[in-house]
Amino acid sequence: MTGKDLPALNIADLQSLLRRREVSPREVIDVLRARIQDVDGEIDAYLSLDFEAAAKEAEKANVDLPLGGVPIAIKDIISVAGEPCTCASKILHGYRAPYDATVIRKLRAAGAIPFGKTNMDEFAMGSSTENSAMKLTRNPWDLSRVPGGSSGGSAAAVAADEAFGGLGTDTGGSIRQPAALSGVVGLKPTYGRVSRFGVVAFASSLDQVGPLTKTVRDSALIMNAIAGHDPQETTSLNEPVPDYTAGLGRDLRGVRLGLAKEYMIEGTNPQVKAAIDAAVKHLNSLGAEIVDVSLPHTDYATAVYYILATAEASANLARFDGVRYGYRAENPKDLLDHYGRTREEGFGPEVKRRIILGTYVLSSGYYDAYYLRAQKVRELIRQDFAKAFEKVDALISPTSPTPAFKLGERSADPLQMYLADIFTSPANLAGICGISVPCGFAEVDGLRLPIGLQLLGKALDEARILQIAHAYEKSTDWHKARPPIAAAIHKA
Amino acid sequence: MPKTADLDVAYVARLARLDLTNVETELFQRQLGDVLRYAEKLREVDVSHLEAAAHAVPIFNVFREDEPRDWLTAEQALSNAPRQANGLFIVTKVVE
């Protein structure tokens, strides 16, 4: 193993080297820094890097801790003390987090080292990372395409071997969809499983923090560190945290997997459909029983999601008023002008669009018709899943109906962009957990684009979907494929 | 459900304390009109027997002991202020 190969390692393999003292945490940081210098000019996954702080952490790292000496990339919506936390928004340009989010405190306690903040759609609003006010992140498999979003920076960084693992947030698919489009593993935990304290709120009834990694085992390792009750967060579940690696390696005999007919939608890319069909056959051959189920209210999920998510966002983003932190407009003539211009100049177009929609659906005369009705339909969607999970252990679907699309291809049509969440947002509405794992490639314009298989599990059943995903992963080779940018540099 | 034509982006923007250019107002009027038309499908659903779900997990009224604890110092709380003086945030004038 040479230094050049080191960034290609997954977390578990990196830990073996660290624990055998074949490489030091400090060397890992230096190699990662060199890798990012080589590659990130093309990918633009990172918004800020602090290798000085990371090197200091590395010097005193205890490699025998669960994530000892492992550098982790952090989506720029999660507070890391002393570091920028911009949410890829001009309104937070220059802002530095005064404290660590609970997930960062827990990662540090497990020995991990945060070293860089990754790009995202502004305030996590988007499915392509193109809504970043800072830069465009490119898909490592095809630099003319998006990495997915909103956690596109973390997904692209992991895919391009610029990070061993990363954290993202998922409000309607923002971990799972970029994981699928970038060819990595992404887990959205159960609502309440991972604390959001210190994470900038987008839609508080939907947001969850979770890992983006190269393998399912790495996902379990990060979950072991970040899951658990946080007295500083009122929606945090006070439930025991299992060892998420314990069930990895178990076979699939007796496991029942559900296929929902409502997820067989027109408009799913034929190569995506073929890859999912093959994955279902493969899971069946591993011993899983495949069961047809119905989620009858699926067709309403996107409408419910965009009403509830924008309503909550419009309330959460009211705090950006240019008073206590963030951008403030110059020379306001009065307070209304101060608020109106600060927010006009500070927010980008998608954030403005969602604030308007969210304010409208909460406004007098429209609240019952939109917001209240959407909350009630949400309950039907939750019940659909509860009924399905009486019959099956997990549900299978594509993560995204298409592989990565071209930069700019959908940015003029918000509704088309919103419909990209069709397979992912129902899990957020129902509060259940979900994971995306690589399950094949689409050949487009002579390039291979990753396809993701989504497994949805009932609330607090992360261990189960990790076990199923792991059984799939270890009997396939998809996760071993590297994007051209990684391969090119490793050859050089 | 109200008619989507009821959406008045300029009015809602004032409620949201968000100035918009004329170009943005017209663009959002059209784009959000599309989104609201799409959302009209929720009208088909019978919701008469349902309670609204604020979120998917049954947690209510989480309390903790009302005990003092360390939190941000004044200096930390002011560290990102756009304008400050004498340990205070300077705000835009609100009284004549």
Image: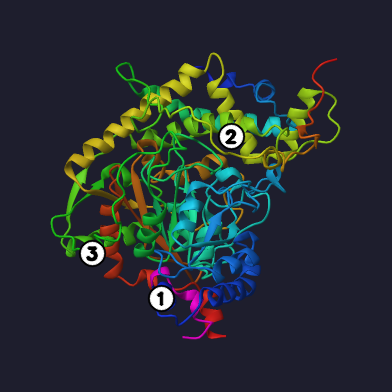
> Could you confirm whether marks 3 and 2 are on the same chain?
yes
Q: In the drawing, does residue B51 fall left or right of residue A214? A: left
Earlier-in-chain disc, 1 versus 2: 1
Q: Which residues are magenta?
A: A1-12
Colour pattern of the rendering: rainbow
Q: Is residue A180 visible?
A: yes
Foreground residue among A133 and A10: A10
Earlier-in-chain disc, 3 versus 2: 3
Q: Which residue is mark 1?
A: A19
Is A164 above or below relative to B41?
below
**What label sits on residue A283 in the rendered view?**
none
* Residue type, numbered disc 3: His
* Residue type, numbered disc 1: Arg
Q: Which residue is mark 2?
A: A354
Q: Nearer the viewer, mark 1 or mark 2?
A: 1
Residue that appears at 56% across and 74% down: A26
- What secondary structure is found at the residue carrying circle 2? helix
